Image (spheres, rainbow, N blue to C red):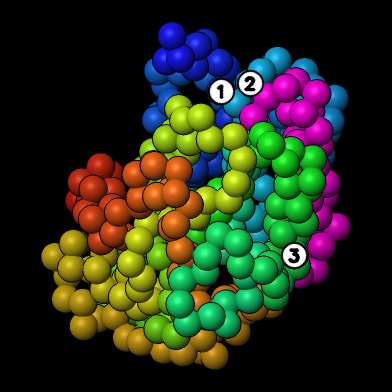
Amino acid sequence: AQGARRSMTTVVVLGASGMLGHALVAELKDHDIRALTRAQADLTDRAMLEESIPQGAVVINTAAYTDVDGAETHSDDAFAVNAEGVRHVAEVVKTRHGRLIHLSTDYVFDGAAHTPYPENSPRNPQSVYGASKARGEQYVQETLPDSGIIARTAWLYGLPGSNFAATILTLGKDRESLTVVKDQIGQPTSTLDVARMIRSLVDSDVTSGVFHATNSGHASWFDFAQKLFTLAGWDPQRIKPVSSDAFPRPARRPAWSVLGHEAWLTHGLPAPRDWKDALDEAWVRGFRELVDES
């Protein structure tokens, strides 16, 4: 049976110690899973990858150089992992006759749109990090045209891990007020939901294409912070809106990071739910404890 065949397929998670990797390992625990950290499978070390990826495996690559600002001055490091490292993974998956689900980012777009970016929108990164991730996407599509899936995510939060939601709740316990950017719009996205989206791809017959693995709807960072305060039972008026100019950063951030979700529907897979619903679940599944600890 097809289901039985799938259950025998090894699923390799690269970057398993990261925030999304952690959620994926939990979500896929009923699969034959091989969870690999950077120490076990470094993307820049092809020999390690060849030892780690078995024949016919589904490989989920969450490993990346993610220091967006650091990439501006360490472009060689960013490209070594996010571009050349991804090429290594794709080439090894090809020799193993496997399937690759590669995690990418909204930073491959310029952020100048005003409507959700379709999956086939032209890439136009505005930062070194974005450029390195865009190159990685190209390598996946060139190397694995029939067995490579790109899953772009954005504004990711989850536990354990360092992320906006955890930071806001930690600061909110001690500070009278917080200033949060209001002129960047995106989709707050729970690692729990992304893990389920990736699982639906693993368990499907989809072998290639681009999917946007973000929650639906949209919000500013200010809106996101206010929702977190409301969940914590705090006065959301303690959050003060500011423009991005108040927080100058080395790397340019996309002003608009809202991604479209057509591909899920086209392939008969569940469309992502609204970000507020996802946050409500993430709250009771762990984030509430960040507030209860005080």
- The span picked out in magenta is 70-99
Q: Which residue is under mark 2?
A: 57
x then y, percent, for residue 152: 55, 54
Q: Which residue is under mark 1?
A: 11
Give yes or no for residue 72 being in the magenta stretch.
yes
Q: Amino acid at mark 3?
A: Ala
x then y, percent, for residue 98: 68, 24
In terms of secondary structure, where does tag 2 sit? loop
In terms of secondary structure, where does tag 1 sit? strand
Q: Cβ–Cβ below 8 Å for labels 2 and 1?
A: yes
Mark 2 or mark 1, which has the lower sequence index?
A: 1
Mark 2 or mark 3, which has the lower sequence index?
A: 2
Q: Quadrant of the C terminus?
A: bottom left
Question: Residue at position x 57%, y 77% from top?
Answer: 111
In the displayed structure image, the side of residue 111 where residue 133 appears, left or right:
right
Observer able to see residue 33 = yes
Label 1 crowd (10 A; few <14 / some 14-19 / many >=20)? many
Q: Which mark is residue 131?
A: 3
Image position of 213 with respect to 149: above or below: below
Which numbered mark, 2 or 3, is in the foreground of this view? 2
x then y, percent, for residue 161: 46, 47
Q: CA distance from mark 3 to mark 1?
A: 28 Å
Question: Residue at position x 45%, y 27% from top?
Answer: 203
Image position of 54 with respect to 216: above or below: above
Image position of 99 with respect to 257: above or below: above
